[in-house]
């Protein structure tokens, strides 16, 4: 299985923008700078077009980039870079951690960008992701201990509440949309949420020995057969594996990410790729038949990698 993997980065200490490298059967090779752009923290790839939350001319906003690395268009609408970008059809949504906002833009057929609106949730709310569920848009707000729910036009219609100090960060839906698995950054928990009522069914620590409140749990992914959830935690430099069969979470493994500060990771077939920001590398691991993370296979040098997508 041969893939091209693209990485978003911070451009503070050596990175120059968006990078790419090759993946085949766990082997990572041929890293190169694809597009020179400032702070493309989070990137999305759909229909051959990369969209990046980045610093652009006039401030911060979104850039559309071809797979050949050409910047097709940019739009500026905020003073600090958003930490997440999601695409739903031709609509682009960004979440701004510092400003406590979620914004909406459109990607036109010619790949030009049009800014639509920004919705202020609260300054410093810690907005960290945008999730889509039918015609709803969900935004985990770390410092509000809630997930704020909007309609597609960013009209607020509800929220999911968590205990004080939880810090909801990233989530992922099952393919049928019935369940949401969500990880909290501050309390290091995985939550199982029923999507028709937004009821929290259960939760479990993703750290060894049931520890909580160590901070900095980050990314979450769901296995192809939807039986395992994988979570990264940056302070401990680990990947956690949770069995979620029948929505009854059980922590079955914690393992080194192969570097430091696993801000993001992704699953490609039977392999897990961890983007380790502070060791400037992406490391691949084999996934065992039981879903646990196995041996390290390969690594590639990428400066300050913080998001991964592939095609």
Image: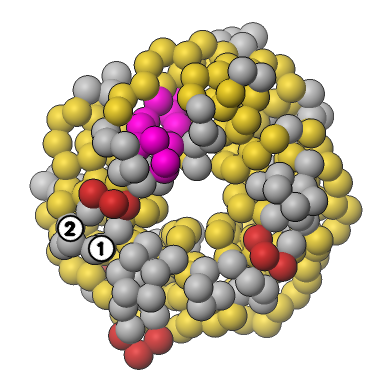
- The answer to whether marks 2 and 1 mark residues whose Cβ atoms lie closer than 8 Å is yes
**Picture layout, residue 282 above or below residue 204:** above
Disc 2 residue crowd, few under 14, some 14–19, many 20+, Cα 10 Å: some
Tell me where the magenta segment starts and ends, as one range: 92-103
Q: Nearer the viewer, residue 201 or 279?
A: 279
* Res 3 seen here: no
Residue indicated by mark 1:
166
Relative side of 80 to 3, left or right:
left
**Picture layout, residue 309 above or below residue 123:** below
Residue 302: where, in percent of width, then height?
A: 77, 56
**Looking at the rendering, in which quadrant would you find the N terminus?**
bottom right
On residue 18, which mark appears?
none
Residue 31: where, in percent of width, then height?
A: 85, 52
Instruction: Please tell me which residue is depicted at 65% across the width and 39% down the height of the picture.
Output: 39
Instruction: Please tell me which residue is depicted at 64% across the width and 38% down the height of the picture.
Output: 40
Q: Is residue 100 magenta?
A: yes
Relative side of 239 to 202, left or right:
right
Instruction: Please tell me which residue is depicted at 79% across the width and 34% down the height of the picture.
Output: 36
Residue 177: where, in percent of width, then height?
A: 29, 45
Secondary structure of the residue carrying tag 2 is: loop
Could you say which quadrant of the image residue 35 lies in? top right
* Res 59 seen here: yes
Could you say which quadrant of the image residue 59 lies in? top right
Relative side of 252 to 83, left or right:
left
Could you say which quadrant of the image residue 265 lies in? bottom right
On residue 162, which mark appears?
2
Instruction: Please tell me which residue is depicted at 79% across the width and 51% down the height of the picture.
Output: 14
Q: Is residue 250 magenta?
A: no
**Looking at the rendering, in which quadrant would you find the C terminus?**
top right
Residue 124: where, in percent of width, then height?
A: 34, 43
Q: What kind of secondary structure does the magenta stretch mostly adopt?
A: strand
Secondary structure of the residue carrying tag 1 is: loop
């Amino acid at each position: 299985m041969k893939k091209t993997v693209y990485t978003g980065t911070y451009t503070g200490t050596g990175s120059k923008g968006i990078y790419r490298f090759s993946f085949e059967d766990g082997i990572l090779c041929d890293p190169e700078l694809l597009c020179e752009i400032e702070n493309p923290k989070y990137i999305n790839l759909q229909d051959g077009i990369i969209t990046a939350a980045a610093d652009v001319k006039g401030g911060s906003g979104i850039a559309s980039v071809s797979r050949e690395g050409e910047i097709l268009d940019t739009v500026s609408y905020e003073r600090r870079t958003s930490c997440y970008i999601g695409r739903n059809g031709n609509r682009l949504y960004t979440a701004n951690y510092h400003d406590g906002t979620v914004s909406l833009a459109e990607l036109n057929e010619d790949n030009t960008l049009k800014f639509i609106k920004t919705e202020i949730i609260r300054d410093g709310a810690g907005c960290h992701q945008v999730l889509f569920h039918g015609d709803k848009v969900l935004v985990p707000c770390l410092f509000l201990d809630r997930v704020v729910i909007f309609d597609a036009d960013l009209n607020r219609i509800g929220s999911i509440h968590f205990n004080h100090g939880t810090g909801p960060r990233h989530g992922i839906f099952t393919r049928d949309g019935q369940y949401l698995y969500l990880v909290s950054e501050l309390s290091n928990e995985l939550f199982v949420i029923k999507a028709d009522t937004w009821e929290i069914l259960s939760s479990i620590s993703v750290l060894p020995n049931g520890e909580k409140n160590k901070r900095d749990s980050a990314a979450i992914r769901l296995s192809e057969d939807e039986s395992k959830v994988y979570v990264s935690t940056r302070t401990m430099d680990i990947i956690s594996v949770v069995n979620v069969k029948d929505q009854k979470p059980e922590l079955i493994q914690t393992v080194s990410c192969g570097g430091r500060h696993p801000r993001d990771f992704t699953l490609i077939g039977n392999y897990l790729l961890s983007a380790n920001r502070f060791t400037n590398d992406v490391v691949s691991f084999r996934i065992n038949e039981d879903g646990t993370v196995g041996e390290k296979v390969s690594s590639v040098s990428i400066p300050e990698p913080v998001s991964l997508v592939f095609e």
